[in-house]
Image: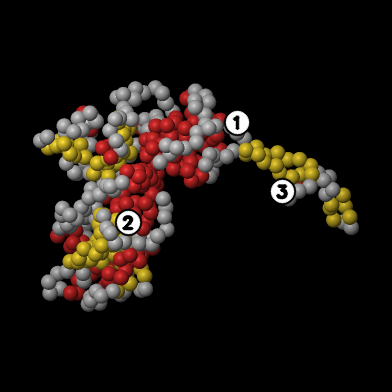
Amino acid sequence: MSNYTLRQRCFVELVEYSTKLYSEILDPVFFEKNICRKKGVSFSFNVTGFLIKGNHILVVFPKGYKLPDEDEQLELHVRTLAETLARYRSEEELEEEEKELLGNPEEADPEGIAAAIWLISDYENNGYIRKEIRSHRSSHGANIDWPRTVRKMTPLFSKGSPIYPDVLTRRSRIDYNNLLYQLHMYAVQRSYEKYGWILGWEKMDTSGFIAEMPCDRYVARYILQRELEDTFVDREMKLINILMEFIIGSGEDDERIKLSTLATPYFHYVWEKICGHVFLNRYKDLSNFIPKPRWNSSLEKSISQRPDLLYVEDEILYILDAKYYDVNRNLPGWHDLVKQFYYYFSMHKKSAMKVRNALIFPGVTDQPVEDIGYVDIEDLPELGQIRAFCIDTYEAMRQYGRYGTENFRERIKPHFASEEVVE
C-alpha cells in the first residue's frame, strides 16, 4: 500500500488533477493504455474502476460523482463500486474492448483484483464451498435411504407385505481435507490480504485460514478441472472457474511490473444494467410492442429499435433511456432526443396504451429522485414529452451490486402525475 491515504487514491472520471501532486502513482503504463490522458500540467482518467500497479491501488468513480466528506462513508462508496463492477463482469457477455480492463478470465493475471473481489463477495454471501462425505449404516432414523435399503437388505414378509427390520440411513459430514475446500480457503486468504480493505475486511478474523497453497499449481489445475467436470451446481461452477483464474500461475509474475485492473472505459454499459435492475426492466417481455423499421429493397438489411428499458404499470407503458451524462456539464443532443420521441410515437401507435417517456441520469441527489425538467417539440404535442430524472449514483449502484430489491419505479412515478399528453 502506498503512503497516500484512501481519499488521495480516489478520483472521478474525466475530472482534471495536478500531475505534480500525483507524480508518484502516475505510472507511464496508464498513459500507454489510454487509461489516463495528459492536458498540460493536468491529467484525467478515461475509465471507471480499480487500478493496481505495484503497491498503488487507485479508485476511479463514475463521472459526475461526488465523494463523501467522511472517510468511513468513502470506504462504503469504494466497496459499492467494487461490488457493482464485480457483478457486471460476472454476469454480462463483455464486448472485446471491455475485456482487457475488466480482467478477461482467458488472459487473467494470477491473484488479479477482479477475481479477488468476486471471491471475497461470494465468501461473504455463501461461505466456503462444502464437500460432503456420505456414508450408509444399518440403523433407524429420519434419513432412511429407501432405494438403497430395498436393494441391499433382506425383508421379512407379513401378510404378503415386506417389512424391513433393518434399514440403511444416510450420514453426511463435511470433508475438511478436501483439496477444493483448502484451495478455496487459500484463495480467500490471499484475496483478503491483497484487496480486503476494498470490501471493508481489514478487521476480519483470519484464524484457521490456510496461509500457503496446499499443493503446487499443476496439481491445483488438475483438481479444479476435475471438480468442474463433476458438478452441475451454478454457484460451484462459477466459483471453480474463478478459483482457476485466481490461482493458476500464482507467484510466477513480477508484481512490480504487472498492472491489474477492474475498470471500464464504457461505464455507460454498466449504467444501463444498473438502471435495468433498479427499474425492473421488462424489455424482453414487451419487445412485441416495438415496431420494426424495414427496407423495401432487394438488399437485405436488418434494422431494429432498441430502447433501454420498458415496463408497464397501471396500463401505462414506460420507455426509459439510461444516459451516462454529467448533467452539470452537458445534456443529450438532437440525435438522442429524436430516437426517444420516435420510440414514443411508434410504440404508442402499436400498443394503444398511454406512454410515458424519460431519460435517467446518474448524479448526486438529496431527494430520492430529482426531476430536472422535460423536453417537448413546439406545436407537436402528439410527440409527447421526454422527462429527465437524476437518480443517486451511489444508491443505484448499491442496489445493483448487492442485488437489492427496492423498486425505483415508485421514485419517478409521482413526477408524471401532472403530465398532459395528447394520447
**Residue 379 horizontal/vertical position (percent):** 12, 74
Could you tell me the amino acid type at mark 1?
A: Asn
Q: Quadrant of the C terminus?
A: bottom left
Query: Answer yes or no: do the residues labelled 1 and 2 have beta carbons within 8 Å?
Result: no
User: Residue 321 occupies which quadrant of the picture?
Assistant: bottom left
Q: Is residue 413 above or below residue 61?
A: below
Q: Quadrant of the N terminus?
A: top left
**Residue 134 horizontal/vertical position (percent):** 67, 39
Could you say which is closer to the camera, residue 151 or residue 239?
Answer: 239
Decide: few, some or many residues near mark 2? Use Cα within 10 Å; few <14, some 14-19, many ≥20: many
Residue, x 22% and y 31% (percent of image)? 26
Q: Would residue 51 be found to the left or right of residue 168 on screen?
A: left
Residue, x 85% and y 56% (percent of image)? 161
Q: How many marks?
A: 3
Residue, x 28% and y 59% (percent of image)? 366
Residue topped by disc 2: 275
